[in-house]
Amino acid sequence: MTKINSKIALVTPLKDEIDNIDNFLSSLKKQSISIHTLVIVENDSTDGSKEYLDKIKSVENIDHFHVVSMKFEDKTYRVGKKYATIIDKGFQFLKNRSSYNELDFIGILDCDVFPKQNYYEKLVSFLKNNPDVGITSGLIYTQNGRQHIASQNWVRGGCRIWRKKCFDEAGYQIAFTADTVSVALAHLKGWKTKTLKSAKVISREVDVRFSNSSEKGYHAYYRGHTLFYMILRSIYIILIKRKFKTGFTLLKGYVLSFMNKRPRIEDKTLRTYFRNYMLNKITKKYT
């Protein structure tokens, strides 16, 4: 194991992952650097995950192992505010510990995401060598070697780490698409967000539970994206990616949200950020 004097804390949301727990913990045991703290936030599991976790008192290569349980009236799997609430529960647990100020990096690692052996060593070295970068992640691959369909430059939500200074300055908001919002919060505080393409994690088939394009249309409206931007994005999906239904449904979800005046993110600074999103991309303001 490589000796790097950096303390990493990870938060893992978990629901009905009995088949993944051993592989998940094994991937952390094999990391080339130690993990200071792992907080698993178990929520409403019915497959024995909670009972299995309760029997685990310590994990090799993890200095401090904790399991926190949450219960919701809504028992369904949701990737919106419910997911963000679960993540925030883990973050608050970390903040309430006396060791919080000793941490150097804070991250999210989903239970169905298995980092390669040198994943966190690479991310830590990358952040140390790039002091202007506040959030980073590697790239996600499926077990058959297929890369996640998202842009290679987009910091992945389920395997990212924050520099603690960035995390403290930018914060984490409970919101729809909290991963996207947290990138915006970092940018607004002057931090850059970049992927490290040589760092890899393996995941089960991606985007299976995230394919509701209509709801993604609402999320874009919720954040504050303009209609013009969404039209261009939908055209790109239809003409370039050849996904007519996805592009049409995305735009439809946005327009219906606009017509029905669905709730939007309350933070006006964030809404301004997303309203100017296309201009910022063109001018590379945050890169």
Image (spheres, rainbow, N blue to C red):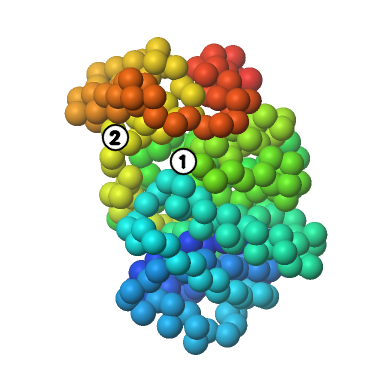
Looking at the figure, which quarter contains the C terminus?
top right
Residue in front for this viewpoint, 235 or 121: 235
Task: Name the disc covering residue 156, or none.
Answer: none
Residue type indicated by callout 1? Phe
| Residue located at (45% from left, 67% from top) | 71
| Residue located at (71% from left, 60% from top) | 95
Q: Is residue 176 left or right of residue 242?
A: right
Residue at label 1? 176
| Residue located at (65% from left, 31% from top) | 187
Residue type indicated by callout 2? Ser
Residue in front for this viewpoint, 1 or 85: 85
Residue 121, image x, y percentages: 64, 58
Task: Give above or below for 116 relative to 152.
Answer: below
Q: Is residue 111 visible?
A: no
Tell me the quarter of the picture where residue 252 sits.
top left
Task: Name the disc covering residue 213, or none.
Answer: 2
Counting other residues with Cα less than 10 Å from the Cα at mark 2, is it few (<14), some (14-19), or many (20 or more)?
A: some
Report how far apart the C-alphas of labels 1 and 2 lie in the structure. Answer: 14 Å
The extreme left residue here reads: 245
Which of discs 1 and 2 lies nearer the camera? The answer is: 1
